[in-house]
Structure formats: structure tokens, C-alpha cells
Amino acid sequence: MSMNKRENRPVELPILEALERHSQDERVSLHVPGHKSGFGLPTAFHTWAGDVARLDQTEVAGLDDLYQPIGPIAHAQGLAARAYGSDGTSFLVGGSTAGNLAAVLAAIGRRERVIVARNSHQSIWHALELAGARAAVMTPPLLSTGIGGAVWGPITPALLREAIAKWPDAKAVIVTSPTYTGVVSSLRELTLLAHSAGMMMIVDEAHGAHLPFHPALPESAVSAGADLVVQSLHKMTGAMTQTGLLHYSGPRVDTARLQRALRMVQTSSPSYVLLASIDTVRAELAHTGEERLGEAMERLATAADNLRREHPGLLWEATEGVPVDPFKWLLYAPALGCSGIELADQLRIRHGIFTEWADEVHVLCAWSYANSAQDVAAVVSALRDVGDHLQCKGQGDAHALSLDAASWGAHAIADLVELPLRTKLHEAPSVTVSLREAVGRRVVDAVTVYPPGVPLLLPGERMTQPLCDCIEAALQAQIRVDGLTGDGLHIDCVG
């Protein structure tokens, strides 16, 4: 379980305070940005962003430097490390994508092997490609959500033991926890296994920045002892989009190499608006996070109990012993006699409720402590309304597209497999074919349904008929699919 991180010290906001001092001191701006504290913003945008633009500054005297911090940014990063319990923390202004890229580039060298979970975000696979690493893939189990529905389960200690035995020379282990749907792995056990084998543990915890701040939430990766932990702050807390944290702990991390990697993958002109957002959210979580999270969880738990009584099977429950973030609701739409896309459309059109994602089977709701009691009541009332009035086309399809679309590929992918190096794929002659002609061939680029951004096919894997059906179902449902060519109906293959 996560430790109580509530702080009783005075609230410190070093970045925001430095920006306030600068705003008071500066009379004439002869530095970038060109909008000059918002005065040069287009009128239409100034109405919305005029006040915020006063914080949009650059690395002038008193405001520090993200990549060589000695002032307010250094102070703020130290406060974040203390709040999360890490040895050190770096602020991210490129989201978890930048953090994942930096973490992998700092930990893995060219042609070094890394054990990586099959359900990792595309940014992890991009990082491995940039690093020239050898990806040894372990496929987590599937958890059924009902007929036609499945999501990725946790990486189990047994699976990691098997992977370590198969690839004892691996440099690191990479897992995603929580998953997009909120499933959490037993990170403490996994980290102990990795460390015992002499490997680093890297955790993509993009959806878990809130976990350390309430004892009833699953244990965070930092608390579990992971070496490198990447978090998005905008996903589950009150920070602005593109904000994140990269935590590092222990003697296995080369901090100089990590800082070089961060300079490579992030902008040389970081947004002070985003930096201030990170710092203020850290302060709020550290001082009042437990109270706010607790109140929100209580509201959600009561609402969830009512929904499960009224509509059994609608709100997915993981199997016993699998922790799930209570702020993620996965709705199984066939319980209301409709598809997930129909349910999401009705919630949006009839009630103004915009959900995180939908597919043929599910609707995903991503709550946070910012959702009010009125929000929760409105969603429950809307689900009752949809259940009472929606006339649906069908009852769900056993071959429909599942939320974690890559899960459909798991049936055709071995639990433990090593992918070919990307350079070898590009050296081989390729051909562009239709999706159906690609069945049996190896794909050159990853095919990714987004969101959640987990590749359905990885470079070098073979297209199967179930995977082809899955891609076509996504396209028919007008769901974004990356990695296709031309008109979006073809794909580059080898072999």
C-alpha cells in the first residue's frame, strides 16, 4: 500500500514565486517569447490566455534553467523528490513520452537486451528503437471483461521469473503499471526479482502520479523500489497537459547519462507555464492530496456499488487479487444491450458527458479528484437513462474490437519472444500490400490503435487473420490506427 505522503510543512511554490517576482520586476522585455508577457497575443486568444501568458517566460536571471538548475527549478525538483520518496526527480514538459525516451536511452545501450512487457506504450518501443536495443518481450495474461471483451492483466512474478531465466543477460525490465484501464502489477515483487538478477526496473507509471498520496491506493513504483519511474501529471492529477515527472533512485542509475538523455528528447525552451503547473500540483498533492483523493474515492465507491446493484456486469471488476485504480471505470456496454461506441455517443449527445475512450465493447471513464459529487451523480443518472431508453443494434460481438486492442494479438504471440532488430527489418526489401494480403507477412512498422497507444503489432511481428480483423474493425469504427500507409488501408511488409 502507498504511504501517507501528507506534509505539514509550510507550502512552498518556488517556480511560481520566482515568476511572480519577475513579473513585478520586469518593465521592458527584450527577450523571447515575442508576445511579451501576453501583450502581443492575438486578441481572440488573449481573452483565454492573457493572464497565463504572464508566466510564459524564458531562462532569464532569477528563473533558473531546467537543464542546469541551481535556483527555483532545483528547489522545486527537490520538493517533488521528497513528496514522492525518490532520490531525485526531473520535471518533464514533453509528457511521459519524453520521460520514457530518456529513461530507456539512459539505461540501455546499443544491442543490449531488455525485457519489456508486451502492453508497453508506443513511446517505450520508440525508445528501444532509438537505443538500438534488443527487445525481449513478455506477454501478460488477459483478463476477461465479458463476451468479446478483454484487457491486459498484470505482469506476474511467475512470468518475470520465466523471462529472466530465458534472458539472464538482460540489462533492464520495463513494465507499465497502472495500465490504461487501471490494472496494477505487484511492483515490489517484480522489482526484487529484477534487482536479484542484476537488472534495472523501469516503470511507465504514466497513469499513477496520484498513487503515493493515499494509503488505500495501490503501491506506487517509487515506493516499490523501482530505479526509474515515469509519470504523467496531467492524466490523473490537476496539472496541465504535457506535464510529467521522471523519478530516479538507487545506485543503478547513471544520473549524468539520464540528464544528457533528457536534454536530447526535450525542448531547449521549456514552458515555464508547465513548470509552474508541475510545482503547484506537487504542493497540492503533498499537502491536501490525501483528503481530496479520499473524498473522491468515497463518492466513486458509493456510486459504483449502486451501479453494480442496478446493472450487474456494467462496471467491470477485476479478478480477486488484482489491484485496480478506483479512478478508472471500465464499462462493459453489452450489459446495457449496446456497443461501447453507441453508449459513449449517447452519453455525449444526450447528456454532454465526454468519456476517455470507447470501442465496440467498452467505455472507459477516467475520474480524478477534480470531479465533483454532481459529476458522479450526473454520470450515474445518465447511465440509468441510457439503460432505460437506448434501442441498440446488437448485444455485442464476440469478435469485436477490445479496448486494449493488442490483447487480440496475444492469442497469436508467444508469451516470451525476442523481436528482430529494427535495422535488419529496414535492410530487407519491403512491399506495400493491403491488410488482407499482409496476413502471414512481417510488418515493418508498428501498428497502433490510439488511444491507448499500445501497439497491436510490433515491427517484425507477423500479421494474423484475427489481428487483420481487429484493425479493420477499428477503421470501420473510425478509431485512429497508426502505422498504415497511403490511404490507411495498406501496410509495409517484408517476407
Image (cartoon, grey):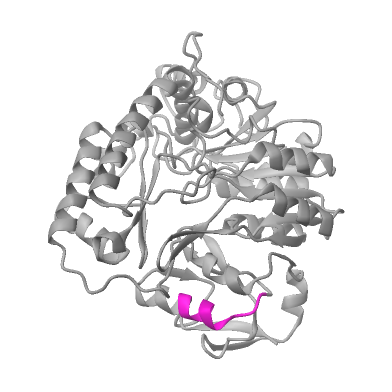
Task: Tell me which secondary structure the magenta stretch mostly adopts.
Answer: helix
Q: Which residues are magenta?
A: 461-470
Q: Is residue 127 visible?
A: yes
Provide residue 155's location: percent of width, then percent of height.
Answer: 63, 51
Q: Is residue 57 visible?
A: no
Taking 398 as reference, is 439 left or right? right
Taking 101 as reference, is 436 left or right? left
Q: Is residue 297 above or below residue 309?
A: above
Q: Quadrant of residue 440?
A: bottom right
Q: Quadrant of residue 301?
A: top left
Provide residue 295's location: percent of width, then percent of height.
Answer: 34, 25
Q: What residue lies at 66% left-to-right and 33% top-to-bottom?
A: 224
Q: What residue lies at 66% left-to-right and 75% top-to-bottom?
A: 461
Provide residue 145's location: percent of width, then percent of height.
Answer: 42, 58
Q: What residue lies at 76% left-to-right and 34% top-to-bottom?
A: 255
Task: Find the residue positioned furthest to the left.
Answer: 389
- Judge by depth and name the residue closer to the eye, 8 or 418: 418
* Magenta stretch contains residue 399: no
| Quadrant of the image containing the N terminus | top right
* Magenta stretch contains residue 466: yes
Q: Is residue 475 above or below residue 142?
A: below
Taking 272 as reference, is 441 left or right? right
Task: Find the residue positioned furthest to the right.
Answer: 169
User: What number of labels is visible?
Assistant: 0
Q: What residue lies at 47% left-to-right and 49% top-to-bottom?
A: 318
| Quadrant of the image containing the C terminus | bottom right
